[in-house]
Amino acid sequence: MSQDVLDLCSGFPQHDFDAGEELLAQGPGTGRLFVLIRGSVEIRRDGVAVATVSQPGSFLGEIAALLGRGHTASVVALEPTGAHVIHDAARAVVERPALLLAVARVLALRLDAMTGYLADLSRTYGGEDGHLAVVHTVLGELMTIRPLSVEPGSERDVPDY
């Protein structure tokens, strides 16, 4: 799938980042989406390293881009890194449904892995008292999250950016 993503992004500009350079800062949104070409980055939430990403074709900034919100984490290059830069991600995914599908698949895979992990924790610790018993409640809440607002319509109704 990673080569497919890179192929989808071949027309977008590329940017090189030095080790220690920040691609995205946690906080206000930029509307940008990055697709890793080479190198590796660290994802930091509230200053805590939560993941290292080095797989070419990985999306960076997709949550903020799709939700139109601020970035939930910072992304920092750990070594010389190259990435495609999609400056107006909201528009790009409307204009390129294959790109939207690729992002959706990645997010669905993450959600599936996370809920599977939480279900396993719930099976293991669900009958216990204390802080681990809350896992069952968290899993239920995650599985039933609904958007706060949905704007029905079609691609034809998308405003011109």
Image (spheres, rainbow, N blue to C red):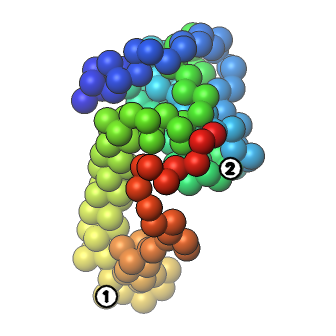
Horizontal and vertical percent position of residue 39: 48, 15
Tell which circle, 1 or 2, labels the residue nearer the N-terminal end: 2
Picture quadrant of residue 77: top right
- In the image: residue 87, left or right of residue 4: right
**Label 1 CA crowd tier, 10 Å (few <14, some 14–19, many 20+):** few
Position above or below: 20 against 62: above
Identify the disc placed on residue 103: none
- In the rendered image, the quadrant that contains the N terminus is top left
Percent x, y for residue 131? 49, 80
The residue labelled by disc 1 is: 127
The residue located at (52%, 50%) in the rendering is 158
Tell how many labels. Answer: 2
Q: Are marks 1 and 2 in contact (CB under 8 Å)?
A: no
Q: Tell me if 53 is positioned left or right of 90 in this view.
A: left
Q: Residue furthest right?
A: 28
The kind of residue tagged 1 is: Gly
Between 126 and 55, the one lying in front of the other is 55
SS category of the residue bearing label 1 = loop
Please state, as top left, top right, bottom left or bottom right, where the C terminus lies in the image. top right
Residue at position x 69%, y 38% in the image: 30
Is 151 displayed left or right of 32 in the figure? left
Residue 67 lies in quadrant = bottom right
Q: Is residue 137 above or below residue 116?
A: below
Q: Is residue 90 visible?
A: yes
The residue where tag 2 is placed is 70
Could you tell me which residue is drawn at 54 percent across and 42 percent down? Answer: 90
